[in-house]
Amino acid sequence: MNASPLAKREKGSFFMVQILFARPEDEEELRDIFWNYGMDMSGDITEHLVVKNGVELLAGGKLSELEEKKFYLEVIGVKEGYNGCGYGSLLLNKMVQNPWECCKKPISQNRGKYVITTIARGRAVNFYQRHGFKPCDFEQIPLEYRYQCSDCPEKEDCGPVPMILIGG
């Protein structure tokens, strides 16, 4: 993925942010972001995308292609204090527009229809819906992720909702 800067407007001014794959030195900061949501990193740090404003890490996430043209959004989060500023939307839009470019290890060609699934915390459902996701059945979630909420002690409070987006 190229790390071309994107203009972001905030409070009447523009500044540049980049979306790029994380580096090992981003691990602690990205882990802190996810821990604030009760989540953790998923696999190797360099497989995660991050949103940066210069050196400051503002958001991160990981999208994986598990089967040809079938992607799973494993984790996404925004740094505390920056919620509602559009960084999560910026990152998710990038993933939805070209999931192949946002996967460290894509397995299919960048053409045609594709599917992205995820499990949203109940309070995040509207966020995903604004980006084209729709609620679906847990049966549509890849098997290796389908039951991750089953034994979670926070399941009642979290209210997990399986989500799907069909793109292309």
Image: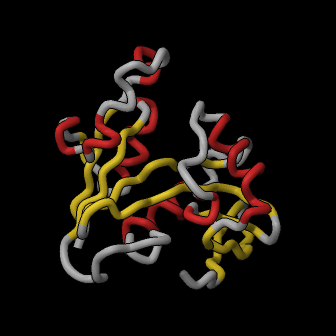
Give the colour scheme of this rendering. Answer: secondary structure
Where does the C terminus fall, quadrant-wise?
Answer: bottom left
Residue 56 lies, in percent from the top left, at 80, 61
Q: Is residue 97 left or right of residue 20?
A: left
Q: Is residue 69 left or right of residue 82?
A: left
Q: Residue at x 45, y 49 (%)?
A: 74
- Total marks in image: 0
Reply above or below: 168 against 85.
below
In which image quadrant can residue 105 be found?
bottom left
Q: Is residue 54 left or right of residue 1?
A: right
Q: Is residue 27 left or right of residue 155?
A: right
In which image quadrant can residue 20 be found?
bottom right
Q: Residue at x 54, y 55 (%)?
A: 61
Q: Residue at x 41, y 61 (%)?
A: 64
Where does the N terminus fall, quadrant-wise?
Answer: bottom right
Residue 18 lies, in percent from the top left, at 66, 74
Given residues 18 and 66, the one toward you in this image is: 66
Reply above or below: 8 against 79.
below
Residue 83 lies, in percent from the top left, at 63, 45
Q: Residue at x 37, y 29 (%)?
A: 160
In which image quadrant can residue 103 be found?
bottom left
Given residues 148 and 61, the one toward you in this image is: 148
Reply above or below: 146 against 6.
above
